[in-house]
Amino acid sequence: MTNREKTQRIALSGLLVALMLVLGYVESLIPVAAGIPGIKLGLSNGVLIFAIYMLGIPTAFVLMVLKVVLSGLMFGGVSAMMYAFAGGLLSMIFMSLLSRIKGVHVTVVSMIGGVMHNVGQVGLAMVMLSTPKLLYYMAILMVVGLACGALTGVCADSVMKHLKKLRK
């Protein structure tokens, strides 16, 4: 990889982190399900899907960590960072594994990522609060994770298809 390519990759990564932060903030302003905590669209997940397929898994992982830390510092705090990292890590593991399987569509990878993000966060909450009763809530969040993951997966797939056309 040339210095120019490295510089372009770093610049693109910076833009993607900024995009994830903006999408996370915009998402916090959208009342998806009033009164039900933890339900979000997962808009920045679409950026991670893009990064996994277009930049590679190691870069996508670094972007996820940067997004968690920076959004935690700007908007949340230490506990928000812990929950976001638990969900992000589990999500990235599953999305990374699935993205390597030939024939698994981007939308399916995103859907599983959405579900696993919720599993990671609720799993951490169950440990922190010492209560298995949150399993009932996880069932609701898994359905929401599938739906929101499908939405972000379709968007990410569409963006990647258009960018591939532009490269040609």
Image (tube, helix red, strand yellow):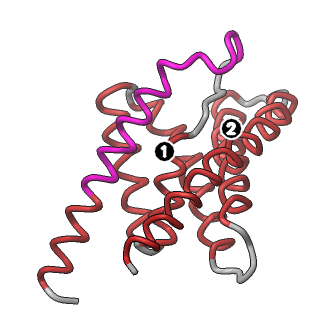
Task: Using a 10 Å C-alpha cutoff, classify the residue at mark 1 as few (fewer than 14 neighbours), some (14 to 19) or many (20 or more).
Answer: many
Disc 1 secondary structure class: helix
Disc number lying in front (1 or 2): 1
Start-end of magenta stretch? 14-36
User: Could you say which is closer to the camera, residue 25 or residue 164?
Assistant: 164
Front-most of residues 28 and 74: 28
Horizontal and vertical percent position of residue 45: 54, 49
Q: Type of residue at label 2?
A: Val
Mark sitting earlier along the chain (1/2):
1
Residue 85: numbered disc: none
Q: Dominant secondary structure of the magenta stretch?
A: helix
**Which residue: 81% across, 28% down?**
137
Q: Is residue 45 magenta?
A: no
Mark-to-mark CA distance, 1 and 2: 26 Å
Residue at 48% in and 23% down: 28
Q: How far across and how far down the image is residue 54, in percent?
A: 45, 72
Packing grade of label 2 (10 A; few <14, some 14-19, many >=20) is few
Q: Which residue is mark 2?
A: 127
Q: Is residue 6 left or right of residue 114?
A: left
In the image, residue 125 above or below residue 8: above
Location of residue 113 (image quadrant): bottom right
Q: Residue 52, percent across and down? A: 50, 68
The quadrant the N terminus occupies is bottom left
**Disc 1 marks which residue?**
44
Q: Residue furthest left?
A: 3
Tell me whether circle 1 and circle 2 mark residues in contact (CB < 8 Å).
Answer: no
Amino acid beneath label 1? Ser
User: Does 101 sit left or right of 50 as displayed?
Assistant: right
- Disc 2 on helix, strand or loop? helix
